[in-house]
Image (tube, rainbow, N blue to C red):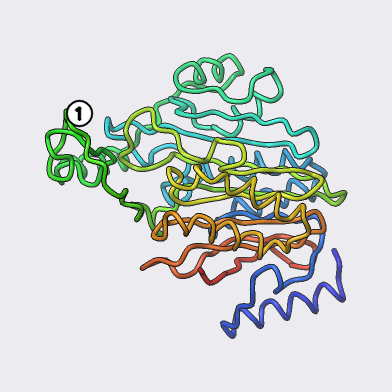
Amino acid sequence: MAAGRGGDWQGVTVALLFLGVLTPAGAASAAALPVVINTWAFRTAADTAWRVLESGGSELDAVERGCGQCEVDQCDGSVGYGGSPDESGETTLDAMIMDGNTMEVGAVADLRHVKNAIGVARKVIEYTKHTLLVGESASLFAVKMGFPYEDLTTQKSLSLYSEWLNQSCQPNYWKNVVPDSSKSCGPYKRREEVTYKEEQTSSQRNVHNHDTIGMVVIGASGTVASGTSTNGAIHKIPGRVGDSPIAGAGSYADSTAGGAAATGDGDIMMRFLPSYQAVEYMRMGTDPTVACQKVISRIQKYAPKFFGAIICANTTGSYGAACNKIPGFTQFHFMVSNPLLSRPTEQVVDCI
């Protein structure tokens, strides 16, 4: 695939990475289609999606299989079963998939007892007129679609839950309750008087607890698809849903403009619809790297210490990424596959 000139570009990219001279990631490689881009250094997910395209599969197939690979691999414990137990000790899953040609979205949230969350999300598109199914009802739908009903708990997740209980349930997501949630476990009750103080916007999540795989796939004809999968915020309050399964927040795809996917502190990021915003910037002709940066800068104005990153790609195959610089998180790693690269390649961008 694309020998000759592609090999030259590959050599330039490898040299840049080797020397540590990182220009904005989208500018480090020439635009080419098809392209697969995903959050974090989830190499097997990128490889799986790319192989689906190479074998003639659709963009939606590539997103479903790529994100589904992370569900099987339990990528960093933040995707799939056996990770991020909520404050009751249960692992639940969120996922979405979006078709940039039809603008159809399938999503599931607070999915219990079913491992292949993005597979169920795809079935929401194919077999219902809905967009988002949640909770135990989403699980019942999944069983009707042929997915096995399984326990998502593992020894690892039980251990994480036990350690949390032994640390007085720290950290947690409660506020304005008694007993003091910063010092003890519940059950909690609301205070009679709510204290309105500036919200703490520094995240409990960090580079070692990634929280999502987000993927954008753009085919040779410019067709765009995107998707996400996650087990959400560890020790979340049961019923919590973050940005990942929300169209325009977790990811967004529009075959007339491009696609984007976000990762990080979903409780903050979903308020800004960053993936939708990035695609709209690209629609106006903004370079993908700059589109990503503009989205991060917008969130920074309200939550300067938030943990998060976003990937962007337009319909020419140009791509980019951006992240918010906080202590312990100064660079964002992501994967790119296109005809100019001999294999899925890890790329790095400096946070802003």
The residue sitting at 58% across, 61% down in the picture is 334
Circle count: 1
The residue sitting at 51% across, 68% down in the picture is 351
Residue 187 in view in this figure: no
Q: Is residue 130 above or below residue 351?
A: above
Dot 1 crowding, Cα within 10 Å, few <14, some 14–19, many 20+ = few
Residue at disc 1, secondary structure: strand
Judge by depth and name the residue closer to the eye, 335 or 321: 321
The quarter of the image holding the N terminus is bottom right
Report x, y in % for residue 5.
Answer: 86, 75
As drawn, the residue found furthest toward the bottom would be 19
The residue sitting at 66% across, 43% down in the picture is 252
Which quadrant of the structure image shows residue 147?
A: top right
Q: Is residue 313 above or below residue 243?
A: below
Judge by depth and name the residue closer to the eye, 263 or 284: 284
Circle 1 is placed at which residue position? Answer: 190
In the visual, does 127 lie left or right of 305?
Answer: right
The residue sitting at 45% across, 22% down in the picture is 135
Amino acid identity at mark 1 = Arg
In the visual, does 105 lie left or right of 90?
Answer: right
Residue 110 in view in this figure: yes
Which quadrant of the structure image shows residue 11?
A: bottom right
Which quadrant of the structure image shows residue 130?
A: top right
In the visual, does 72 lie left or right of 188?
Answer: right
Report x, y in % for residue 141.
Answer: 56, 16
Q: Is residue 91 above or below residue 20?
A: above
Report x, y in % for residue 265.
Answer: 43, 49
Judge by depth and name the residue closer to the eye, 10 or 280: 280
Q: Is residue 144 above or below residue 58?
A: above
